[in-house]
Amino acid sequence: SQKIEQNSEALNIQEGKTATLTCNYTNYSPAYLQWYRQDPGRGPVFLLLIRENEKEKRKERLKVTFDTTLKQSLFHITASQPADSATYLCALGGSYIPTFGRGTSLIVHP
Amino acid sequence: DAMVIQNPRYQVTQFGKPVTLSCSQTLNHNVMYWYQQKSSQAPKLLFHYYDKDFNNEADTPDNFQSRRPNTSFCFLDIRSPGLGDAAMYLCATRDRGERVLDEQFFGPGTRLTVL
């Protein structure tokens, strides 16, 4: 069955450092992969999408890579700030119905 | 601002007492979704509508039903809530019309407590 793995342990980093979050998947060949941010008690907010034929996508301090051979996406936040603290979800899809991972909590310490 | 609105934000019900959660959107998107999310878990798709076409996920319990009377509104009915139905319920929309957008727009969610 399809499986999406995100690290269940929180990632703690110091302000100003680069945060790197990982999304691994198995038994799946997604056409695209998305990253969302979710704050406690709120709905997810879309950040970036990368397609299967793209290797890298950037948006301001965010960078996403997609390796379909390794079946892995890396999500980077450069120059991290305490305001970046949240849970980050990856979602994979082939149509208009993506499947979500459980997310990884990021805590940026001042 | 165009957005997805969910009411109420917090809902408390008693075991077995029917409850209805509502979602409205001003985005005029033709796809609407209902997700259930429990603490530290992935959002789990319950239903989605493509225009008026209703799609029920295979593992969605019969206890859950949905209605979409028009493009803007969607309702989630839980006929006999059990303790295991306590969760955050998320409504989302997506545009699959002429201008296809890649992202889902989520509402703030309704936190359901079952006593």
Image (tube, rainbow, N blue to C red):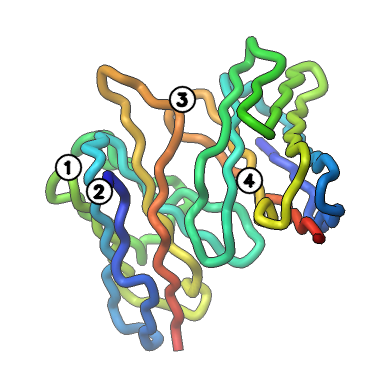
Amino acid of disc 1: Thr
Amino acid of disc 2: Gln
| Badge number at residue B25 | 2
Name the secondary structure under disc 1. Answer: loop
- Residue A20 versus residue A3: which sits nearer the camera? A20
Q: What is the x, y in percent for residue A89?
A: 63, 45
Task: Give the quarter of the figure containing the N terminus of chain A.
Answer: top right
**Which residue is tagged 1?**
B71
Name the secondary structure under disc 3. Answer: loop
Name the secondary structure under disc 4. Answer: strand
Q: Nearer the viewer, mark 3 or mark 4?
A: 4
Name the secondary structure under disc 2. Answer: strand
Q: Are marks 1 and 3 in contact (CB under 8 Å)?
A: no
In the image, taking residue A51 as reference, residue B2 lies left or right, namely left
- Residue A60 versus residue B17: which sits nearer the camera? A60
Q: Is residue B18 above or below residue A4?
A: below
Amino acid of disc 4: Leu
Q: Are marks 1 and 2 in contact (CB under 8 Å)?
A: yes
**Which residue is tagged 4?**
A89
User: Gap in Å between the C-alphas at discs 1 and 3?
Assistant: 21 Å
User: Gap in Å between the C-alphas at discs 4 and 1?
Assistant: 28 Å
Residue shown at the point (66%, 48%) measured from the top left: A88
Circles 1 and 2 on the same chain: yes
Q: Chain of mark 2?
A: B
**Which residue is tagged 3?**
A95
Residue shown at the point (30%, 37%) measured from the top left: B31
